[in-house]
Amino acid sequence: QVQLVESGGGVVQPGGSLRLSCTASGFTLDLYTIGWFRKVPGKEREGVSCFSSSDGSTDYADSVKGRFTISRDKAKNTMYLQMNNLELEDTAVYYCATDLYGSRWYLGCLNGDRYSRWGQGTQVTVSS
């Protein structure tokens, strides 16, 4: 059974750090395009960061460049999002997702419409 489980969310002060984890089961995570997204009530879902399986490249939203880093651990079948220098605007529910079927390969990896499987999300709250 294909499953993604996020963890690592919490409450942190501005300028602080968190590391989110996304553990996959039922498939080999690094064989597929995978990404992190976030959602704030009343706002559009935003692509935060992603790995493209076609060329191994990564991409980041402009709002997180230089602060967030995406990585993978093949042995643990897990993807991470290291978030540093967090800002109030980073408060959101963070989701990981995988493009399991590749039917929308023409979409950029920060486009959530590309993805077919999603985790349940983890809340990140940045508050002073």
Image (cartoon, rainbow, N blue to C red):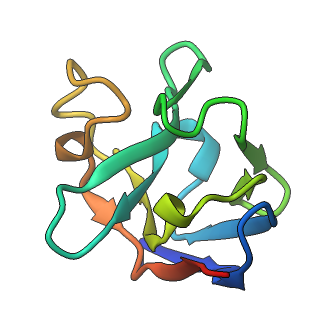
Taking the image as shown, residue 86 lies to the left or right of residue 112, namely right
Q: Could you tell me which quadrant the N terminus lies in?
A: bottom left
Q: Quadrant of residue 93?
A: bottom left
Say above or below: 117 vs 9.
above
Seen from the viewer's position, the closer of residues 13 and 93 is 13
Q: Write the residue at 78% across / 60% down.
A: 15
- Which residue does the image show at 74% across and 76% down from the upper left? 13
In this picture, is 48 found above or below 86?
above
Q: Residue at x 51, y 69 (%)?
A: 26
- In the picture, residue 21 is in which quadrant? bottom right
Q: Where residue 42 sits in the image (x, y, percent)?
A: 14, 70
Residue 61: x, y in percent? 46, 33
- Residue 98 image offset from top left, x and y in percent: 40, 52
The residue positioned farthest toward the front in the image shown: 128
Q: Residue furthest top?
A: 55
Q: Seen in the image, is 16 located left or right of residue 57?
A: right
- Image quadrant where one finds the C terminus: bottom right
Q: Is residue 91 above or below residue 107?
A: below
Task: Give coordinates of residue 81: x percent, y percent.
Answer: 68, 54
Q: How many marks?
A: 0
Task: Decide if residue 107 is on the left or right side of residue 70.
Answer: left
Closest to the observer: 71 or 123? 123
**In the image: residue 105, left or right of residue 100:** left
Residue 2 lies, with reference to residue 107, above or below; the image says: below
